[in-house]
Image (cartoon, grey):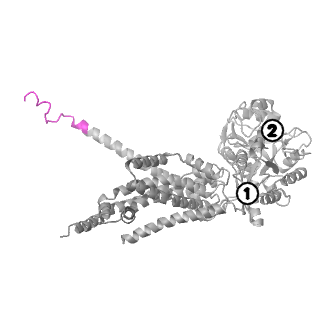
Amino acid sequence: MSKKLTLLGVACVVTLAALAAILGAATTANATRTDDQLVGAGSSFVAPLVSQWQNDYQTKTGVQIVYSPIGSGGGISAISARTVDFGASDAPLTPDQFDACKGCVQIPWALSATSIAYNLNGVKNNLKMTGPVLARIFLGDITQWDDAAIKALNPGVNLPSTKITPVYRSDNSGTSYNFTDYLSAVSPAWKSKIGVGVNANWPAGVGAKGSSGVAGVVAKTEGAVCYVDIAYAKTNKLQFMSIRNRAGKYTTPGLRGIKAAAASIKKVPASNELHIVDPAKGDPLAYPISTFTYVILPTKTDKAPQLRRFVFYALNPNQGQKFGPKLLFAPIPTVVLVASEKTLKKVQS
Amino acid sequence: MSAQPAQYSLRGTGRMKRRKRVNLAMEIVATAASAVAVAALVWLVVSVLIRGLPALNLDLFTKNQALFGQAGGGIANAIVGSFVIVAFATAFAFPVGVLCAIYVHEFAGATIRQAVRTTLDVLTGVPSILVGIFVFSILVAGGKQSALAGSVALAIIELPLIARGTQEVLALVPGSLREASLALGVSRWRTVLSVVLPTSLSGILTGTMLAIARAAGETAPLLVTSSIVANSTSLDPSKALNSLPVTIFVYSESPDPNQHAQAWAAAFILLVFVLLTNVAARAFLARGRRKLEGAPARRRRLRVYHLFTRP
């Protein structure tokens, strides 16, 4: 009996080892043949829209889109290391990042806005706010909700003396880029002290990871205020502010406000880098903290046909873009669409 | 003689009460400490269960993540993925670990034995994030994430545990068994295979189960090798698969209370798995020990003795 057990034991060990070896060989052979999958990572800003595309695209073409919202900074490093097939970022690539990416293009594929979400029980939604006052809040100069500056903008609103807790993105975030871009445009103090970037030396408040992390902290903390894409504010039922634009009107991050801000684009530069924060007086409806978000593709890749097909689907007003409005992504304007499609042709095998 | 008696007097010093009180106090302290340790585990299990209970339903085990903003969904792909990753990790680590232990115990000289033993002990203590980024730099950077890369990382974590566990059990096998087998003309390798291994099989399985329980909960290696995952259940190890520890980590950062409950439920599933594996491992070990120290060994010895004492 012990001999049988021994032989059984030997057989088990040998089988396991052989199985491991065979499967290892087979799967490494298979590893390059993942035609049915496109892997991407990056911006959490565009994640709600991508999750709609994932569902629809797989039903239409059978290709599975795998996307991980690790933040714009993570997306840029992932595509630079070619660990993923496409990266997504709300912050346009800097010249250094273009070099590090070794032959990449950025293509604006979605358009939405960063809302200023807050949590104040008993206070109405859409509190009025201007850029300079907002900058002072995030610089830590204004520490309570019943500060004179905020009261002056909102006469007739009963503001409590709760402490203001600014919440910022602790990871390298394109939404941070968008917000600091706006603050630098409206507040010289911010521009000289902090500047623009995917991350900053936030002087006040607490940090959280990802759009969902930030929204989560605000939802749990009385008196907190943050900057987060409007899709997350809406889903988590957070209050958000109406911001004064250059025309002097208070606008909210709705589809009309976003579309009006994007209408300020007349011509797209060669690098596709677009800034639509604090747009000129032109449209009184423009929401001043809107932003495009980009997909980053390598110009030379084995998966060029699949990637082109997917991004084409995403840019198409009747396919990818039509999922946008429900999540407060406005359809990208025609002039940008033309430039995007032209850049897409540069992605070759 | 009259100068000594006082020192060695057998009469009590009269401090019995104090001694009894000190005894009692220390007993109470020791019991309380044990109670705290047990209570910590019980409190952990109960609080995980209470927080995860709202999400423990059939959907959790059969559905995958819901779309953004929608409620419901489950962690089916995480459970399947964890199973696949740990299965491959054990398949890689088990043969290597057992053979390593056999070499160290049966065939190696004293210096090599010590060196390998020390190396294995050091390997046990390497932080799992280091193992993770090491495997990342070799298998993932420049390529794609995959469950196999995660399995290799977990195998590195399991290997020293299996090897050391096997080594301990091999040492428990009585030397007389080996000597008897060798005396009968059986080759050394055949001795190991037919005499030593079957005797220590339960102990080897114990070590493996403990290693599996440890690897199943490691988060750091999986975060860097298998975290960009699809929203569907898959058995394909060449792609990145979702896993329970990664799911717990990601969901815990989400603002959605629904996902928080699912994270707790996933934590509960992981906890139950670890507890059951540990209990089963102890049961196996107890059974194995009884076998080694009980009747069968004596029977074998008697049989061999009979051979040598034939008139």
Residue A19 point in image, percent of width and height: 55, 65
Q: Which comes sooner in the sequence, label 1 or label 2?
A: 1
Evaluate whether residue A98 shows in this view.
yes
Disc 1 marks a residue whose amino acid type is: Ser
Circle number at residue A182: 2
Q: Does A141 appear above or below A339?
A: above
Name the subunit of mark 1: A
Q: Main secondary structure of the magenta part?
A: loop
Residue B15 among magenta residues: yes
Residue A228 point in image, percent of width and height: 74, 45
**Viewed as shown, does residue A286 lie left or right of B80?**
right
Looking at the rendered image, the quarter that the C terminus of chain A falls into is bottom right
Q: Residues within 10 Å of mark 2 (few under 14, many from 20)?
A: many
Q: Does B166 appear above or below A242?
A: below
Name the subunit of mark 2: A
Disc 2 marks a residue whose amino acid type is: Tyr
The image quadrant of residue A159 is: top right
Q: Are marks 1 and 2 in contact (CB under 8 Å)?
A: no
Circle number at residue A226: none
Range shown magenta:
B1-19
**Do pointers 1 and 2 mark residues of a single chain?**
yes
User: Which residue position holds label 1?
Assistant: A51
* Marks 1 and 2, how far apart at CA: 28 Å
